[in-house]
Amino acid sequence: MERLVIDGGRRLSGEVAVSGAKNSILPLLASSLLTKEPCVFHQIPWIRDVEVMLEIMSHLGCKIDVDRERRTVCVEASQLSSTDLPPSLASQMRASFLLVGPLLARMGEVRAPHPQGCAIGRRPVNVDIKAYTSMGSTASYVDGLFHLRTTGLWGKRMYLDYPSHTGTENVMMAACLSHGDSYIVNASAEPEVVDLANCLRTMGARITGDGSSVIYIDGVEALRGAEYTVMPDRIEAGTYALAAAITGGEVTLNKVNSSHMEPLTHKLIDAGAIIEESEGTYHVARSGQLKSVELQTLHFPGFPSDLQAGFTTMLTQANGVSTVHERVFDDRLQYVNELKKLGAKIRIEGQTATVFGPSPLVGAEIRALDIRSGAASVLAGLVADGTTVIDDIHHLDRGYVNIHENLSKLGASIRRIAN
């Protein structure tokens, strides 16, 4: 076990390149199970979740060739030897369930444990299961394992009870090899869903409507291999943008898709930050006092829930009273208790946080409760007076590539030590 030690009060300045998107590479890797031909992916973020996903796929019989220096992975699923996801690995992260749709569509059977991952509230997989059964599969849940079986999936018009990110991707992949036409209504419009659809089209899938609430898939008999570059991680980019804003710094982010950043851009400007965008770059600066704002998270193009904890942390340094409404996950405000240990003044009522600022933060020992609250703890440590120690940083390793090294290059005093 390791921990982060941060000596706060330093203004960040410089440039940082954004990694490939965590929430994109995981479904992209899963999509390689839909074909017997090799799939090559570039701009791989070397995070723990990617490593676990590749371990699971290796267990299934995939041949995997990794080039860490070039950030490339080649997956060949020509001879799958198992359709059982190993519970010890698959239960570690929710994204493991993304393998269910491709396995069911191609192999006709799959067993998988209920996925876990970050404890941020209820994240059921009933959207996925309901869709698979409507397409012609049977489903049971015995001894902690889902068992799905089919003699062939058939295209259907499916209404998702809510625009599940993972559910949309899972069903879209399964529908690619189904018989006939499928419609996913109330689909997720997240950029990562569009990235997956772009990759699937490269593999020969017939998909339209991605990026909207209705996605159409015309099933094909087989898909081919592909070579594809992962989109930039808008959440990682947003975290560094918030780090610049909270420290009163000036940071340029490279390899960014600015259109994906639009919800954050508007709220940062409302809060007093200065944003400059150009092709592939995103510049964040702040000269005056941060201002209080009202914020609510929603599915894209709303403000991303994954940046809510970081933005709320920034608002502890804003002048006035801010209100943050969490509309996506029902237990995502747990991190507030960690911020209070540093002196943050925040009141929680249901799914709403009222932030009273500016409040001086003072270094203390706190925990990373999940990936994004861990990033919020880092942001708080950057601006706190004195030394902040963050435990349970294995959560950060699941979603960020060398966050301490990148922040150090920007001028932060941050180091990783053995606990």
Image (spheres, rainbow, N blue to C red):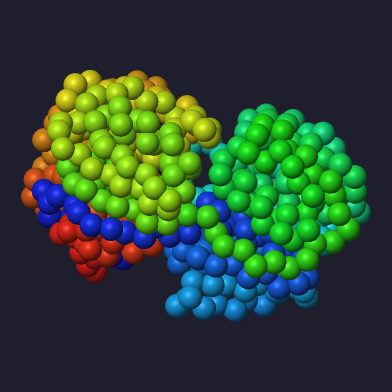
Q: Is residue 19 left or right of residue 361?
A: right
**Coordinates of residue 396 in the picture (x, y in percent):** 37, 56
Query: 395 or 47, which lies in front?
Result: 47
How far from the left and from the top, in percent, is residue 97?
64, 52
Estimate the x, y position of residue 15 in percent, counting from the top left: 28, 58
Residue at the spot 29% in from the left edge and 24% down from the top edge: 293
User: Which quadrant would the C terminus be assigned to in this image?
Assistant: bottom left
Residue 413 sits in which quadrant? bottom left
| Image quadrant where one finds the N terminus | bottom left
Residue 30 visible? The answer is yes
**Image vertical order of residue 329 relative to residue 108, above or below:** above
Q: Is residue 307 left or right of residue 115?
A: left
Q: Nearer the viewer, residue 60 or 238?
A: 238
Q: Quadrant of residue 203?
A: bottom right
- The one nearer the camera, 35 or 107, is 35
Report the front residue among 127 and 305.
305
Q: Residue at x 48, y 41 (%)?
A: 259
On the rendered structure, is 100 left or right of 15? right
Please tell me which residue is depicted at 68% across the width and 50% down the height of the picture.
197
Looking at the rendering, which quadrant does residue 36 occupy?
bottom right
- Judged from this view, the residue extending furthest toward the left is 386
Number of dots carrying numbers: 0
Q: Residue at x 44, y 44 (%)?
A: 258
Locate residue 323, reporting x and y percent: 31, 22
Look at the image and tell me whether residue 365 can be seen: no
**83 w.r.t. 257: above or below:** below
Q: Is residue 308 above or below residue 386?
A: above
